[in-house]
Image (spheres, rainbow, N blue to C red):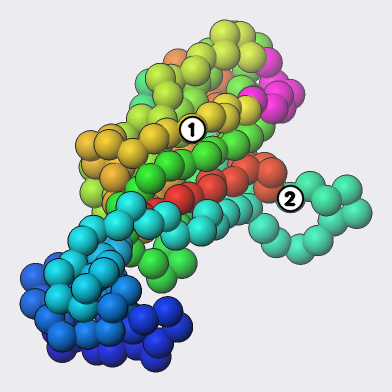
Amino acid sequence: MTVRKIPPSVGESYEGLSTDAKPTVVVINSTFREIDTGIWYLTPNGTDWYAQNKIIRPFTHHLVGGNLTEEGIQWSAEVSTVDADTDYIVLELTMDNGQVGRLHELDLGLTLAIKAGSATADVKYKWQARNKDGTWVDLHDYITKVDIGTSYIECAVSGYRIEGITNLDKYPIDVRLVIQSNETTPGVATAKVKNSSYVKVEVK
């Protein structure tokens, strides 16, 4: 890739790949962003470059949208299991706003509604994430609802995941919800995701 100069703000700004040679005669306090790693560099003397722990502003991904409602509540499409004790994907999304970098932090608030087709079925769910097209990482262990019944109940998980997680350390990312039931028809599990669900990302 050819390194290109970006119009200056403070000093001068450059970007290129981590394998590209950084310019060596530039304005003092210029910056260089490695597009493939998201790392920013600063040169205090116009020659030597030093990596900066620069955090790109947080941005939020919402998992569900659609036609507006008077109540302000929206749901993803319902998905049901078929075979017992088998994962079924309720929702899977790629979160990509055009930036590339190392994940600093994830702030997640995830809500679903789930039910069974019989009064005796046990259902369970799990949220997962990964580097885009990579290996899935469990965000929590399976959560089981015993004899959940045939009416929807809402379940929510939330919290933070900090940098340094294998297979979940680069942006963009994929996020998904999987469910299981311990019974087949009529005791299948059915679930949907609520529009209050979000993933807030910090990239550096």
Identify the residue at horizontal 45%, vertical 50% (top origin).
202
Horizontal side of 46 relative to 101 (left or right) equals left
Which element type, helix, strand or loop, lies under badge 2? Answer: loop
Question: Which of the 4 quarters of the picture holds residue 55?
Answer: bottom left
- Name the residue type under label 2: Gln
Identify the residue at horizontal 37%, vertical 57% (top origin).
54
Q: Position of residue 29 (x, y in %)?
A: 32, 74
- Name the residue type under label 1: Tyr
Task: Look at the image and say whether residue 154 sits in the magenta stretch.
Answer: yes
Q: Position of residue 76 (x, y in %)?
A: 63, 49
In the foreground, 30 or 161? 30
- In the drawing, what numbered circle is on residue 66? none
Horizontal side of 32 relative to 151 (left or right) equals left
- In the drawing, what numbered circle is on residue 160? 1
* Boundaries of the magenta span: 149-155
Q: Position of residue 22 (x, y in %)?
A: 14, 77
- In the drawing, what numbered circle is on residue 74? 2
Residue 81 visible from this viewpoint: no
Question: Which of the 4 quarters of the picture holds residue 154?
Answer: top right
Q: Residues within 10 Å of mark 2 (few under 14, many from 20)?
A: some
Residue 115 visible from this viewpoint: yes
Q: Is residue 71 above or below residue 35?
A: above
Report the quarter where the N terminus lies.
Answer: bottom left
The first of marks 2 and 1 along the sequence is 2
